[in-house]
Image: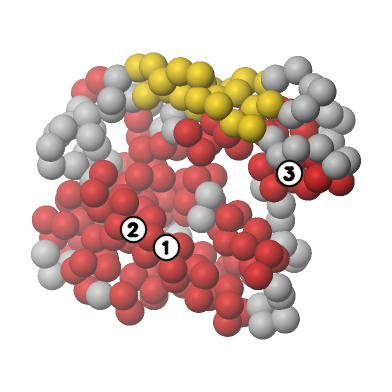
Amino acid sequence: MSVSYEAMRATFSDPALCDLAMMHRGKDTRQNNQRLEFLGDRVLGLVMARMLYTSFPDEREGELAMRLSALVCGTTIACVARQLGMGAWLILDDHEVRKGGRDNESNLIDACEALIGAIYLDQGIGAAEAFIHTHWHNLMHSLVRPPKDAKTALQEWVQARGLPLPLYHELSREGTAHDPLFTIEVQVEGVSPIRAIASNKKQAEHKAAQLMLQHLGEERTW
């Protein structure tokens, strides 16, 4: 499924949008892919929601929501980016290259979502939908049943025991604006708090929930 950057860029009416989607925030602090990433994240969510609604007519809202969460999570987006060979497309500064930025999951996620945003701006929702369908269709149908992410599973664990919902607290945010690290603590009544660190808040919360489940004896593959 790997695609050359030149081939992808050639599909754009405005190739500069494709370049912008690959521009890491460390390379250019003002003109980078963060705004496109914001847009692409919303486009991906909308298109995937429609695909799921159409493909699984007998499933309830909660089941569709769990599928959606798995298909738009960072791990899945990074998998698509790697299949495309997107690491080689990234426009990085020398420091980011030296520290392995071409295979950094956060960089790949940002670039993939930014590319979706760029396609939407350049060619419209139909082209963005076609791109997402091409690269997510098989992933969508490989999920035999709706998966549960770690936060959902932890919530169900406490509810089944009549406990209050888990609480997530941001303990610290370190590093630079371009390379942050979030420390998140999850609290479950009657259990020692668990902490996790990741490059964005959502990932840190997910990791903390996963570690808590492992601590509670509910370890499984997420």
Name the front one of labels 2 and 3. 3
Can you identify the residue that label 3 sits on?
155
Residue 205: percent from left, percent from top = 57, 34
* Label whose residue precedes the other's in the sequence (1 or 3): 1
Residue 98: percent from left, percent from top = 31, 20
The structure's colour scheme is secondary structure
Task: Name the residue located 77 percent from the left edge and 33 percent from the top edge.
Answer: 213
Above or below, 47 relative to 194: below
User: In the displayed structure, does residue 220 sit left or right of residue 113?
Assistant: right
Q: Is residue 167 visible?
A: yes
Q: Amino acid at mark 3?
A: Gln
User: In the displayed structure, does residue 27 sit left or right of residue 86?
Assistant: left
User: In the displayed structure, does residue 22 sit left or right of residue 151?
Assistant: left
Residue 157: percent from left, percent from top = 81, 42
Residue 18: percent from left, percent from top = 20, 56
Determine crowd level at label 1: few under 14, some 14-19, many 20+ residues with C-alpha closer than 10 A: many
Label 1: state its secondary structure.
helix
- The part of the image, by quadrant, that contains residue 89 is top left
* Label whose residue precedes the other's in the sequence (2 or 3): 2
Query: In the image shown, does 111 or 56 lie closer to the viewer?
Result: 56
Task: Name the residue located 25 percent from the left edge and 53 percent from the top edge.
Answer: 36
Can you identify the residue that label 1 sits on?
44
Task: Name the residue located 45 percent from the left edge and 37 percent from the top edge.
Answer: 105
Residue 40 image label:
2
Circles 2 and 1, Cβ within 8 Å, touching? The answer is yes
Above or below, 213 relative to 8: above
Label 3: state its secondary structure.
helix
CA gap between label 2 and label 1 equals 6 Å
